Image (cartoon, coloured by chain):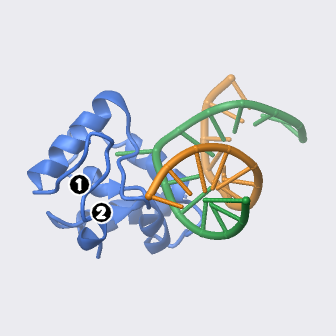
Chain colours: A blue, B green, C orange
Amino acid sequence: MKEFAQNIYTILSYIEKGSLITYGQLASQAGYPAHSRHVGKILAKLPKDTRLPWFRVVNSQGKISLQGDAFIRQKTLLEQDGITITEQGKILKFKQYLG
DNA sequence: CACGTGACGTCTA
DNA sequence: TTAGACGCCACGT
C-alpha cells in the first residue's frame, strides 16, 4: 500500500497547470483501480505546504469533493489555473481539462 | 474479530 | 439530470 501512495505522488507531480484528473483515474493509473476512495485519504495526509497539485484532483462528476474551508482553498487554487467553478463546486467544461 | 467510515465510482429508476 | 442504493477497501476502534 505504500507503493500505491508513492505512485499517487508521482502521477500527481506530472499533472500540469490547466489540467485535471479524477480520484478514479489516479487510483487506476497507480495500479489499483478499486482504491479510488483511498486516494482521498492519502491526499488528506499531504503536508499543507506540499508542492504537489492536490487541488487538480476532483471526482468523476467534475465536482469538488471537499467541504467548508478546504472547498474554498481548492476552488481558489483551481481558479488560479484559469478554471471556472460554480458555487456548487461544479467545474465548467470539466471534460476538456482531462488528459 | 465485527463495525463504521470516507477528498469515490457505477448503475438504476 | 438527479438522487439513492450498492460496491469497494484500508484503517481505527
Query: In the image, residue A9 lies at what x, y percent?
Result: 34, 60
Image-quadrant location for residue B10? bottom right
- Is residue A18 visible in the rendered image? The answer is yes
Question: Are discs 2 and 1 less than 8 Å apart at CB?
Answer: yes
Q: Nearer the viewer, residue A53 or A18?
A: A18
Q: Quadrant of the C terminus of chain A?
A: bottom left
**Which amino acid, by three-letter code, is at mark 2?**
Leu
Q: Residue at x 33, y 43 (%)?
A: A46
For disc 1, the marked residue is A53
Query: In the image, residue C8 lies at what x, y percent?
Result: 68, 60
**A53 left or right, relative to B12:** left
Q: Residue furthest bottom?
A: A99
Q: Nearer the viewer, residue A6 or A40?
A: A40
Determine crowd level at label 2: few under 14, some 14-19, many 20+ residues with C-alpha closer than 10 A: some
- Is residue A10 visible in the rendered image? The answer is no
For disc 2, the marked residue is A12
In the image, is residue A92 above or below residue B10?
A: above
Q: Chain of mark 2?
A: A
